[in-house]
Each structure stands twice: as structure tokens, then as C-alpha cells.
Image (spheres, helix red, strand yellow):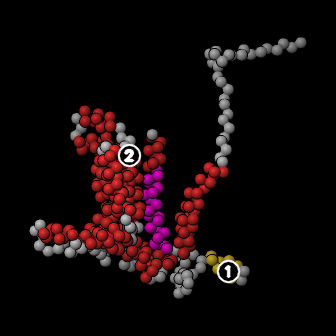
Amino acid sequence: MAAVTYGSVKRPGSKGHRPPPRFVPAKKISWRERAIILVPYLWMILFFLIPFLIIFKISFSITEIAIPPYSPIITFEEGAMQIILHLENYTNIFTDPDGTYLRSYLKSIQVAAFSTVLCLIIGYPIAWALATSKSATRNILFLLIIMPSWTSFVVRIYAWMTILKRNGIINDILMTLGIIDSPIHMLQTDLAVYIGIVYCYLPYMVLPLFSALMKVDNSLIEAAQDLGCRPIKTFFKALVPQTRSGIIAGSMLVFIPAIGEYVIPELLGGKDSILIGRILWQEFFNNRDWPLASAVAITMLAIMAIPIIWFFKNQRKSGGKA
């Protein structure tokens, strides 16, 4: 009879014992949770993806005197389907003899970038004041920042037209004080455009900065001061790195809408302030050239995608380090 040898059984308390692995069953997602997840996807599909695809399709058409004012890209002849894509709308953007579209792109990027820097310079001290103030004072400051947004966007721009015009409040005060002898021309200038953009988009910079400043580790700032760092060096070495996510998020929230702004340059800017938003309006409604306007819009979206992709990559790196 063959002998059977049994291995030694290790007790739970003995050395080298490993508990058996536990297999946690996957949690089933209820239909309510699926519905909640589905809502933002439907929103993005209906109000972003479908309009984008329509504009993208129109950009490969050519202008026609018809309704709608462009040719179809899909036709059926003798039972065969033909897809005709016209690329001249995109080539016209870069081969325009006057360089109107390229100059408008560069001008829009310049205005948006400079406005973003101004919002950052002005918004950082405001966010710091919010983060370091008492709760009662913080509520009042929040109210002062958000209250202008309760008014119509166009009404606020018209109010700045009244303030900046030759017989407006600013010129009246300066002339009354004897600082100037004649009114200063401020309306219909790039300065007025910057003022309007900074005024309207400043809250979008302040709120992300405030959120980042509330998470700052003050012990690092105190340590830098104890080690003899000057205030400026402490600010850039100890405070700014901790609020990097807020700076990037606020900059994106200002830069992206500012690059395609139409109302502010149209009402406050001069005739030479030809930004991409005004070009789109002229091509769509004045020239009725929907294919070219669609190509200009798609190209602008491609340009705007660059800082968005950079932002998400930066967020991933920050999350990985954390």
C-alpha cells in the first residue's frame, strides 16, 4: 500500500502564512448611475460634436447662390454616390494675398495672450486677498467679484463705451482736475479692447486661483522666510509652484474664450482691430461665404486645441507627481 505524505499546514498565526486572496466582485452600475453619466455625453454630442461635424462638412463645400448657400459634398448620379471635397477654402486662408486671415489669427492670439497676462497680474492679489480674509469679508469680496456677471454681457460693454468715450466719465474727471486740456481718445482702440476683456473675464481667473491658494501649505512660505528669502523670491519659489494648477486653469478659462471674442472688439475696438471673431461674422453674414467661414472656424478650433492639449498633459504630470 502506497504511503501518502501530507505537507505541513501552517496556522494563521504561524510565520510565513499568507491569507488567501480575496476576489471582490465588480460593483454593478445601476440604471440611475448610467443615466447620470449619460447626460454630459448627450450634452456634448448634441451641442458640440454635431455642430462641429456640420461646420466641418460645410468647410469642404463651395459657395453657391442657393439655400443653403453652399454645394453638397455628397451627390448621387446614376445610382452612384460621389463625395466631392474642396480644399481651396483651407488653402485660401494661407494663400490670401492680403494675409487677412493670418493677421487676424495672430492679432487674436496676441490680444488673448496679453489679456490673460493682465488678468493674472490683477487677479492674483485679489485671489490672495480672498484666501487670507475672514469669512465675512470674503463673502463681501466674492459678491463684488460676481455681481457684475448678474448684468447682461452686452449692457456691461455699452457701459464701458459710455465711460471711455471723449465726453465720458474718465475724460470729464481728468479735465476737471486739470490733468489734461483736451479729451483723450480711448474708445475704438486696442486699449479699450483690453479693458473690456479683462473686466469681463477677470472672475474666471480669480476663482481658480482662489481655489489653489486655499490649499497652499503656509509652512513652506514660513520656512523660506526663516531661511532669509526675500519676499519676491519667496513668492516665486514657495507660493507660485503651489498654485501652478490654478494659474494654468485660470489662464485657459480666459485665453480660450478671449481668442474668439466678437462683441468686445466690435463695440470697443477700432476698424483696424480685425480679430478672428469679426472675420467670421463678415464671412458668414456679410459675404455669405459659409464654406470659407467654416474653414476659418475649424482652423481656429485647431489652434485653440493646442493649449487645451498642453493643459491636460500638464494636469496628468501634476497628478502623477502627486
Earlier along the polypeptide chain: callout 1 or callout 2? Answer: 1
The answer to whether residue 280 is seen in the rendering is: yes
Q: Is residue 300 magenta?
A: yes
Q: As rendered, which of 120 and 301 lies closer to the eye?
A: 120
- Amino acid at the residue labelled 1: Phe
* 187 horizontally vs 82: left or right: left
Q: As rendered, which of 131 and 17 lies closer to the eye?
A: 131
Q: Main secondary structure of the magenta part?
A: helix
At 46% across and 72% down in the image, what residue appears? 296
Mark number displayed over residue 151 = none
Q: Position of residue 166 (x, y in %)?
A: 21, 75
Extreme residue in the front direction: 136
Q: Position of residue 205 (x, y in %)?
A: 36, 55
Q: Which part of the image, by quadrant, shows the N terminus?
A: top right
Mark number displayed over residue 76 = 1
The answer to whether residue 88 is seen in the rendering is: no
Q: Which part of the image, by quadrant, shows the C terminus?
A: top left
Q: Position of residue 275 (x, y in %)?
A: 36, 71
- Amino acid at the residue labelled 2: Ala
Q: Identify the magenta region.
A: 294-313
Q: Measure the C-alpha gap from mark 1 to mark 2.
A: 57 Å
Judged from the image, the secondary structure of the residue bearing numbered disc 2 is helix
Q: Is residue 187 magenta?
A: no
Relative height, residue 133 to residue 190 (above, below): above
